[in-house]
Image (spheres, grey):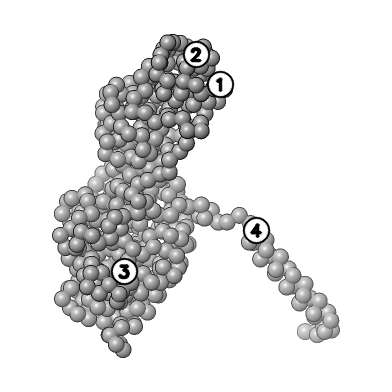
């Protein structure tokens, strides 16, 4: 190779450095990866969830979204002890699609298990939690294993588009709680797992049986509060058939409010939308629960009512007229003042909206018109656990369709909203399952009562 003169070498080196710096700068200024817009999961949520060995196909997830009660799904993202090591459906696109459609995902790692568990190691190349106490009974090998798997789990979560502040769950299967080294090494492992997740800006969750791993954590919380770093959230395996977060194995005050979920039914087949999956059933009550920020309309006009009766010339219902004027204004159909007077200008705007949306023009604003105006917009799938301004639209529309005292308009899809929706679905000949789908929104827009 010919040797360049020193000055030329320096110029070439500087030129290369400038080019590299420019490339790095360009990389930093380009758009962030698509997954950066993914929401934290599961975040604040109260509702039904399921978990299964193999992440379902997209068509299966879509069918279950439209017809099942579930809105959260457990997915096994990491761990050598997983039953389903191969996850062909589990891609960044799959994760982003579920989150965008409203699913809450529960990323699970099933790595080293308690040393006294009779069924592990499951394969020839997976490990158990080291039971060697080490110096001062600190179980350094178990802690090192935990840090490794926390790093692995976070790396896989990031690859899949599961963003920071999401909860990552460690699956510690049930074991003999009376075996001291087995128990203490498991505690040390979970403590180090949580500490490392916190350092990486993820929330720590632990799944285990109520009578072993969860009891172990709760006893440590009460009896040795300064010795271990406890998980932020617990996932209790207690197959009592009760969709709640209670169990007699631990104290009522632990991880409450907002830190519990429970697997209340073990492996069984369920079919929704023609798709059968073998699942475990769960009830989640995490964070603030299903919650959404309040939304102001027209500078503070109240559009959230339990009833939306008809309006006719001469009406004295100022509050409902103001709501109508505001909603028409937001729809681009009214430009007048929000004074609560059902005057000719307001009636003319209402008539134009009626004509533009396939209704006969009338000076009376009926429940059907309220329904059509309120339900206009997107048509998301909503069910128990959903929380958004779309839920408020649904609650208002159902209240408009129903004569009598409707549900509170909160933006949170809870049991009263489900029951009100089911009642309306039954009246209009839809499947009365309490789930809003595209067909629901279409019928509401048409004022179907």
Which label belongs to residue 343? 2
Q: Is residue 284 left or right of residue 250?
A: right
N-terminal-most mark, 1 or 2: 1
Q: State the mark number for residue 230.
A: 3
Residue pictured at 22% horizontal, 81% vertical: 181
The crowd level at tag 4 (other Cα within 10 Å; few <14, some 14-19, many 20+) is few
Q: Which callout, 1 or 4, points at the residue further toward the start of the chain? A: 4
Query: Is there CB contact under 8 Å for labels 4 and 2?
Result: no
Alpha carbon of mark 1 to alpha carbon of mark 2: how far? 11 Å
Residue drawn at point x = 25 percent, y = 69 percent: 221
Q: Earlier in the sequence, mark 3 or mark 4?
A: 4
- The residue mark sitting in front, 1 or 3, is 1
Q: Residue 29: which disc?
A: 4
Res 336 label: 1
**Badge nearest the viewer, 4 or 2:** 2
Residue 372 seen = no
Examine the image and state in which quarter residue 409 appears.
top left
Going from the N terminus, do you reach mark 2 or mark 3 first?
3
Q: Residue at x 41, y 22 (%)?
A: 320
Q: Secondary structure at mark 2?
A: loop
What is the number of the mark on residue 148? none
Task: Kindly tell me whether residue 401 is visible in this rendering.
Answer: yes
The spot of residue 402 in percent (x, y) is 30, 24
Q: Earlier in the sequence, mark 1 or mark 3?
A: 3
């Amino acid at each position: 190779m010919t040797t360049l003169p020193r000055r030329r070498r320096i110029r070439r080196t500087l030129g290369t450095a400038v080019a590299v710096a420019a490339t790095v700068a360009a990389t930093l200024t380009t758009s962030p990866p698509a997954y950066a817009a993914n929401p934290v999961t599961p975040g604040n949520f109260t509702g039904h969830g399921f978990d299964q060995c193999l992440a379902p196909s997209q068509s299966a997830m879509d069918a279950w979204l439209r017809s099942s009660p579930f809105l959260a799904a457990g997915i096994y993202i990491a761990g050598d002890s997983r039953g389903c090591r191969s996850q062909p459906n589990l891609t960044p696109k799959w994760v982003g699609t579920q989150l965008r459609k409203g699913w809450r995902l529960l990323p699970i790692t099933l790595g080293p298990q308690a040393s006294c568990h009779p069924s592990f190691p499951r394969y020839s190349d997976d490990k158990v939690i080291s039971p060697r106490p080490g110096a001062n009974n600190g179980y350094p090998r178990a802690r090192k294993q935990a840090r490794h798997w926390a790093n692995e789990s976070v790396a896989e979560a990031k690859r899949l588009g599961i963003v920071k502040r999401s909860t990552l769950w460690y699956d510690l299967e049930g074991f003999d709680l009376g075996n001291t080294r087995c128990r203490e090494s498991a505690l040390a492992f979970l403590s180090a797992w949580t500490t490392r997740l916190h350092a990486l800006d993820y929330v720590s969750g632990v799944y285990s049986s109520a009578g072993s791993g969860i009891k172990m954590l709760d006893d440590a919380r009460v009896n040795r509060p300064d010795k271990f770093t406890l998980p932020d959230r617990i996932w209790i395996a207690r197959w009592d058939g009760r969709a709640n977060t209670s169990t007699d194995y631990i104290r009522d005050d632990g991880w409450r409010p907002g830190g519990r979920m429970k697997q209340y039914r073990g492996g069984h087949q369920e079919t929704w939308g023609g798709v059968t999956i073998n699942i475990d059933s769960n009830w989640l009550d995490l964070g603030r629960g299903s919650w959404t920020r309040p939304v102001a309309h027209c500078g503070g006009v109240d559009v959230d009512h339990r009833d939306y009766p008809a309006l006719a010339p001469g009406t004295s219902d100022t509050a409902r007229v103001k709501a109508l004027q505001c909603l028409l204004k937001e729809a681009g159909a009214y430009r007048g003042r929000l004074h609560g007077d059902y005057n000719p200008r307001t009636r003319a705007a209402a008539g134009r909206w009626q004509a533009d949306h396939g209704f006969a023009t009338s000076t009376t604003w009926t429940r059907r018109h309220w329904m059509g105006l309120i339900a206009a917009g997107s048509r998301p799938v909503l069910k128990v656990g959903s929380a958004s301004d779309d839920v408020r639209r649904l609650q208002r529309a159902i209240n408009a369709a129903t004569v009598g005292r409707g549900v509170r308009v909160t933006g949170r899809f809870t049991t009263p909203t489900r029951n009100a929706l089911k009642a309306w679905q039954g009246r209009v000949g839809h499947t009365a399952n309490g789930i809003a789908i595209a067909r629901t929104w279409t019928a509401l827009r048409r004022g179907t009562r």
